[in-house]
């Protein structure tokens, strides 16, 4: 079980901002450090935060989380879509049309983009509820239940594999990349979008509520650049492109609501940033996604 408490999150955000000041990442002078120390003291003394009960959270409820999210998954509000789609579109626009597999396709977000470009599309996802939406969205597609590390697809069946925002749910990337290589024809392309490990650290995860009201999280693993490279190279891929976005830059408001309402557990950490906006801006000034373009060796 995980124990989550708003005060613990806010102190963690303060800690991240102080570590960056310590490392000299920005122009964080003595006044900045003193403000952080003063804020920490205020947070520790705040009676409202002290009175909030923490929440014990179960792990690895990925299937339940996506079943509950399926009805609203395509609604506006997921900022990661706005970050990865322009990069993915650039890659897809440079590829020849053929047979494509969207692995962990969800409701068909990328499958639809592939179909619109003329690809014959197959979608695989572990969530039957998500696949219902995908079938409605892309009637010409073929969809089946399956996992990225055990794809129900024949060897060398497709010219392109895409997978988006799903590999953070997989503890070991090597079986997934091996499956991508198995179903691709030699010289085929693989486009991967994954949640950046920095965003995983900041508590961005898919949540679920149990039938008894208990709190659960989907499996969440922060895979770094080296994790993807080791898995991809071992499976016979070469790297054509890697993007980490957004690039750190001038400080902007973090995602969430500019309010001091603590909110319910399902709203954490988004409702907490208003309690500590300066430190939150610094902590969230990181890439949120990685996008990769790989090509399978022609001799594989």
Image (cartoon, rainbow, N blue to C red):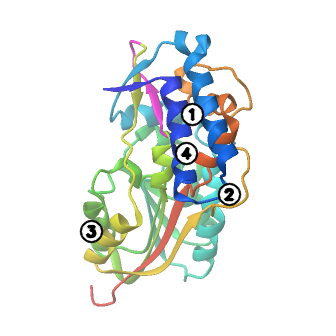
Q: Is 258 part of what is drawn in magenta?
A: no
Residue 254 in sight from this viewpoint: no
Q: Which residue is mark 4?
A: 18
Marks 3 and 1 sit apart, C-alpha to C-alpha, by 32 Å
How crowded is the residue under tag 2: few (<14 C-alpha within 10 Å), some, or many (20+)? few
Magenta highlight range: 204-212
Q: Position of residue 202 (x, y in %)?
A: 51, 42
Real-space Cα distance between discs 4 and 2? 12 Å
Residue under label 2: 27
Image coordinates of residue 88 in percent, x first then y, are 59, 68
The residue wearing badge 3 is: 178
Q: Nearer the viewer, mark 3 or mark 1?
A: 3
- Mark 1 or mark 2: which is in front? 2
Helix, strand, or loop for circle 3?
Answer: helix
Which quarter shows the N terminus? top left
Q: Residue at x 54, y 71 (%)?
A: 119
State the separation of the CA atoms marked 1 and 2: 44 Å
Mark 4: few/some/many CA within 10 Å (<14, 14-19, 20+): many
Whether residue 221 is situated above or below residue 240 in the rendered picture: above
- Crowding near the residue tagged with mark 3, few <14, some 14–19, many ≥20 C-alpha atoms within 10 Å: many
Q: Residue furthest bottom?
A: 299
Q: Position of residue 223 (x, y in %)?
A: 38, 57
Residue corresponding to mark 1: 71
Q: Identify which residue is drawn at 63% across, 48% down.
A: 282
Secondary structure of the residue carrying tag 1 is helix
Residue at mark 2 to residue at mark 3: CA–CA distance: 44 Å
Residue 239 versus residue 128: which sits nearer the camera? 239
Disc with the residue nearer the chain's start (3 vs 4): 4
């Amino acid at each position: 079980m995980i124990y989550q408490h708003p005060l613990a999150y806010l102190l963690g955000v303060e800690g991240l901002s102080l570590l960056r000041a310590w490392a000299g990442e920005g122009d964080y002078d003595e006044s900045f450090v003193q403000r952080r120390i003063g804020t920490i003291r205020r947070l520790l003394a705040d009676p409202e935060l002290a009175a909030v009960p923490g929440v014990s959270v179960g792990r690895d409820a990925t299937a339940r989380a996506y079943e509950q999210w399926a009805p609203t998954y395509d609604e506006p509000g997921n900022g990661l879509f706005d970050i990865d789609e322009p990069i993915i579109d650039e890659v897809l626009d440079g590829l020849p049309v053929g047979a494509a597999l969207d692995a962990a396709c969800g409701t068909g977000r990328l499958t639809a983009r592939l179909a619109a470009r003329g690809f014959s599309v197959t979608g695989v996802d572990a969530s039957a509820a998500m696949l219902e939406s995908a079938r409605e969205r892309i009637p010409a597609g073929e969809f089946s239940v399956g996992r990225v590390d055990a794809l129900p697809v024949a060897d060398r069946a497709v010219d392109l594999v895409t997978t988006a925002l799903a590999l953070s749910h997989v503890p070991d990337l090597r079986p997934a990349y091996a499956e991508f290589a198995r179903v691709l024809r030699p010289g085929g392309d693989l486009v991967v979008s994954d949640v950046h490990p920095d965003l995983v650290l900041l508590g961005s995860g898919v949540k679920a509520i149990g039938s008894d009201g208990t709190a659960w999280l989907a499996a969440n693993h922060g895979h770094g650049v080296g994790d993807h490279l080791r898995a991809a190279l071992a499976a016979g891929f070469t790297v054509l492109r890697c993007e980490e976005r957004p690039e750190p830059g001038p400080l902007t408001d973090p995602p969430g609501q500019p309010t001091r309402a603590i909110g319910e557990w399902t709203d954490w950490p988004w409702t907490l940033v208003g309690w500590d906006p300066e430190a939150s801006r610094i902590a969230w000034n990181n890439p949120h996604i990685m996008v990769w373009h790989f090509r399978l060796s022609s001799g594989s």
